[in-house]
Amino acid sequence: MEFVYKIKDEQGKIKEAVASAESPNVLKARLQARGIEVVEIRPRTAGGDLQATLKALNENVLQVDFLERVTIKDMVVFSRQFAAMVSSGVAMLRTLTIIVEQCKNRKLKRCLEDVRQSIEAGLSLSDAMARHPQIFDKLYVSMIKAGETGGILADVLKRLADFLESKAKLNQKVRAAMIYPMVVLVVSILVFWGMLTFILPIFEGLFKNIGSELPAYTQALVALSQAVRSIWAFLFMVGVLIAGWFLKKYYATTAGRLQIDGLIYVTPMLGDLVAKVSIARFSRTFGTLLRAGVPMLTALDVVKDTADNAVVAESIRKIYTDVRQGGSLSKPMAKSQVFPSMVTQMVAVGEETGRLDEMLAKVADFYDMEVENAVEALTSLLEPVMVVGIGGIVGSIVIGMYLPIFTVINQLR
């Protein structure tokens, strides 16, 4: 329902505005949580204040932004602000009110406003966040729930912020490994297409005026140039797009993702990088959940759902099944082909000493360094390969263009 409410500002002036709420009591509690003195609240009638209506409509229009997304940086800032204010003794509703007013990301702002209203309606913080799975994933909600249960919400929020920062750094390392070869590959394709489309046709007219027979290699390049400029090139591109669409649909299935991720996992160099990233992510996530007080089975279930590689997710699912039946964690990990012996031995030591979360944190730090070294090694290897590849593409076309000139010179001699 919509209500017209009057409040008294710091100067003692009466102001009137319009807001939506479940009831007058909910709206009054929300305003008082901001430290606002409420004078009157009444249901809004059809002949309400036109200026207030236009203002509310304008705010709703400004909030519509389908292109905006919530980044890891936004979540880190929110978690740190929330942790700082909760640890300072500020009430949760008051904390959310302040964060909503200061939040610059409109999508996150609307989400936090709904979370605040849900808490006012009687839901817990974790249940209110669970209503927005696109922003607060299963891992985030599980840790918040553990923090609420153990009375350590501020500590959990700090650990969440640290975890998200580590996740962002790891993602940045992986992107750094992928961006360079992709950019060079695109540049190579554009250079090859440009020379075949614009430069080689000029020499093709010159070759016809020579009158002599072109070398076989040059004839092949001319035929390729004509094919690139024909309807067959367009049909080829359409076929590639259709094949990519079918591949994406197949990857969306459980069997398709398992098969494609399995091929990536056994690819030389790339598979090694994916394995190290997966182990680092598993150790960091699992250790953070355990340190926050989340039960082991719940933590394994969360980690299984947040794994980026289907092969790793399937391995964690099997570990989850064994642990659920009463087994230890290190034994099913040792049977898996995903986790090296060093990881399983450190997990076993952590189980024996009761410091599993610390051991997992050390494993995560070690594999973060391994990922950084693997990225540097992959980049240093790909750099000369890509340079030689571009040189080979350009050189092959240049040789094809100059071969007929050498043939004519030999004929003149």
Image (cartoon, grey):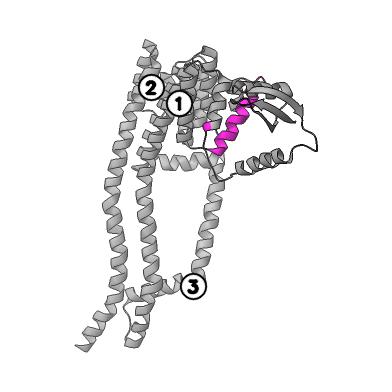
Label 3 amino acid? Ser
Where is residue 268, by image quadrant? top left
Residue at 35% across, 25% down: 363
Distance from disc 2 to disc 3, alpha carbons, whole Å, reads 58 Å
Can residue 271 be spotted in the picture? Answer: no
The residue where tag 2 is placed is 360
**Amino acid of disc 1:** Arg
Q: Looking at the picture, does residue 173 appear above or below residue 221?
A: above
Q: Residues within 10 Å of mark 1 (few under 14, many from 20)?
A: some
Gap in Å between the C-alphas at discs 1 and 2?
23 Å
Range of residues picked out in magenta: 102-122
Residue 346 in the image, given as x and y percentages of width and height: 34, 20
The kind of secondary structure element at disc 2 is: helix
Residue that numbered label 1 is attached to: 80
For the N terminus, the quadrant is top right
Our reading of the magenta stretch's main secondary structure is: helix
Whether pointer 1 and pointer 3 mark residues with C-beta atoms closer than 8 Å, the reply is no
Q: Position of residue 393 (x, y in %)?
A: 32, 64
Mark 2 or mark 3, earlier in chain: 3
Is residue 150 visible to the viewer in this orientation of the structure? Answer: yes
Circle 3 SS class: loop
Choose between 198 and 213: the one closer to the eye.
198
Which element type, helix, strand or loop, lies under badge 1?
helix
Question: What's the residue type where badge 2 is placed?
Answer: Leu
